[in-house]
């Protein structure tokens, strides 16, 4: 994960896109593959893939490998990595804080460091 957050213009550009918002809200309910997202969103397959790429670059979603019970193989699903975005205005300056969801490995590392 990168240490630098996307700038406010990038975040605003992402969130103004209806397909991005659909992807975030749908995957927050359950992990979904790009194919499943195409069925649930009003967008073409290429549009879904482009938006997923933009969301991955901003680290708003992560890709996970899950077993596929129907096909006996594995499939890639997407889950949000975003918990909260806060925009603030203080002394004439806009600020933004992004809080991402903490995965188990990061949580364990933090716990060990705090001991």
Image (cartoon, rainbow, N blue to C red):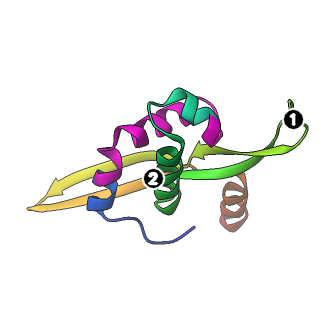
Q: Nearer the viewer, residue 94 or 6?
A: 6
Q: Which residues are magenta?
A: 13-35
| Residue occupying the point 28% across, 60% down | 8
**Mark 2 or mark 1: which comes first in sequence?**
1
Q: Which mark is residue 99?
A: 2
Q: Quadrant of the N terminus?
A: bottom right
Q: Is residue 77 above or below residue 9?
A: above
Badge 2 local density, few (<14 within 10 Å), some, or many (20+)? some
Q: Is residue 45 left or right of residue 89?
A: right
Q: Quadrant of residue 18?
A: top left
Q: Nearer the viewer, residue 92 or 35?
A: 35
Q: Quadrant of residue 107?
A: bottom right
| Residue occupying the point 37% across, 48% down | 85
Residue 115, percent from left and from top: 71, 64
| Residue occupying the point 28% across, 52% down | 12
Q: Is residue 61 left or right of residue 54?
A: right
Q: CA distance from mark 2 to mark 1?
A: 36 Å
Name the residue beneath numbered marker 1.
71
Q: Is residue 45 above or below residue 13?
A: above
| Residue occupying the point 48% across, 33% down | 25
Badge 1 local density, few (<14 within 10 Å), some, or many (20+)? few
Q: Nearer the viewer, residue 105 or 115?
A: 105
Front: mark 2 or 1? 1
């Amino acid at each position: 994960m990168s240490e630098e957050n996307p700038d406010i213009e990038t975040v605003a550009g992402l969130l103004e896109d209806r397909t991005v918002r659909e992807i975030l809200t749908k995957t927050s309910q359950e992990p979904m593959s790009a194919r499943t997202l195409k069925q649930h969103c009003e967008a073409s397959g290429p549009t879904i893939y482009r938006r997923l790429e933009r969301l991955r670059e901003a680290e708003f979603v992560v890709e996970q490998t899950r077993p596929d019970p129907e096909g006996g193989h594995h499939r890639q699903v997407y889950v949000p990595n975003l918990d909260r975005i806060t925009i603030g205005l203080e002394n004439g300056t806009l600020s933004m804080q992004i809080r991402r969801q903490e995965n188990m490995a990061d949580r364990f590392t933090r716990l060990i460091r705090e001991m």
